[in-house]
Amino acid sequence: GIGEAAIVASFMCFYLLGPFLAKTRKMEGKQGHKMRSIETWGMLLASLGVLGYGLAWWFSSTEPITYLLTLVVSDPNAPCSPLSLVFFWAILLVPGLGLSPSPVHPPGIPVSPGSSRRAEFKVLGFRIRQITARKWYHLLAVGLFSPGILLNPSFQSLALIIALVVFCCVECVRLARLWPIAKPLESFLRRYLDSREKGPLIVSHTYLLLGITLPLLLSLLLLGPTTSTTTSTSTLT
């Protein structure tokens, strides 16, 4: 119920606030943009909070915050409990993102994001091509989600749905040019794009997460949480 509520609430919120987000984007670089961004932040967070909280309570017939906290701390002695998964994700994400490939700009030859010319990246002291740098996040995703998919697929599916909603929120913030994090987001996400990806949307990271989430959800829906534990390994291959 919580996962379905998160998806419905996010789509409703983005649909209702779409015109407001578009106007905020048009004000970028103009006087009053910061104040407009603050107002948009307030409306976005309030809408997501009210819609998400209300729909989650309606879908699951229980108070959502208490439910999530109870779920996370339930069965702490299990080999792959929700709490141990949360700690595992935090421990792996910090070095995984901190050591992520950074672009190398040769002196006098700047490489612009999305250009057709090959860009070089540096990771752990090695220089690699852009397409190889993108695979860093594929490896990070496999490391993050493999234990949950194999040992606790129900909780892992809920976490993946919430992550998808967060990714959609991040893309809306970037598209609306919301101060103060839109520009850093734009810089970070566009440095991994190549000539094949054009247009205002950046959805490579969302597609990666969808490619992991959908097979897991289908296995849970068709086979149930018990039998899908073994078959869900196909999402990793």
Image (tube, rainbow, N blue to C red):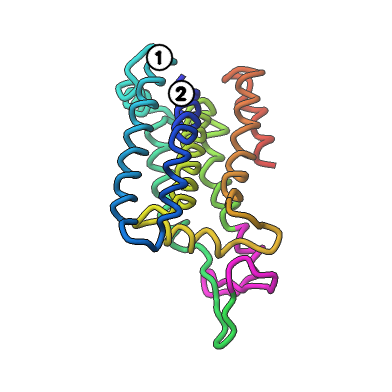
Residue type of the residue flagged with mark 1: Trp
Identify the mark at residue 114; answer none if there is no mark: none
Q: Which mark is drawn over residue 58?
A: 1
Which residues are the magenta region?
Answer: 112-135
Badge 2 crowding class, 10 Å Cα cut-off, few under 14, some 14 to 19, many 20 or more, is many
Q: Residue at x 46, y 52 (%)?
A: 174
Residue that numbered label 2 is attached to: 5
Q: Is residue 128 highlighted in magenta?
A: yes
**Displayed quadrant of residue 220:** top right
Between discs 2 and 1, the one toward the N terminus: 2
CB atoms of marks 2 and 1 within 8 Å: yes
Residue 35 versus residue 99: which sits nearer the camera? Answer: 35
Q: Nearer the viewer, residue 74 or 169?
A: 169
Task: Say what amino acid the circle numbered 2 marks.
Answer: Ala
Position in image of residue 101 (x %, y %): 53, 66
Specify whether 96 is left or right of 134.
left
* Residue positioned 58% across, 58% down in the render: 136
The residue lying toward the viewer, choosing from 76 and 120, is 120
Secondary element at tag 2: helix
Give the Cα separation between the discs numbered 2 and 1: 8 Å
Residue 193 vertical position relative to residue 19 in the rendered view, above or below: below
Question: In the rendered image of this protein, does residue 163 appear above or below residue 224?
Answer: below
Which quadrant would residue 194 be assigned to in this image? Answer: bottom right
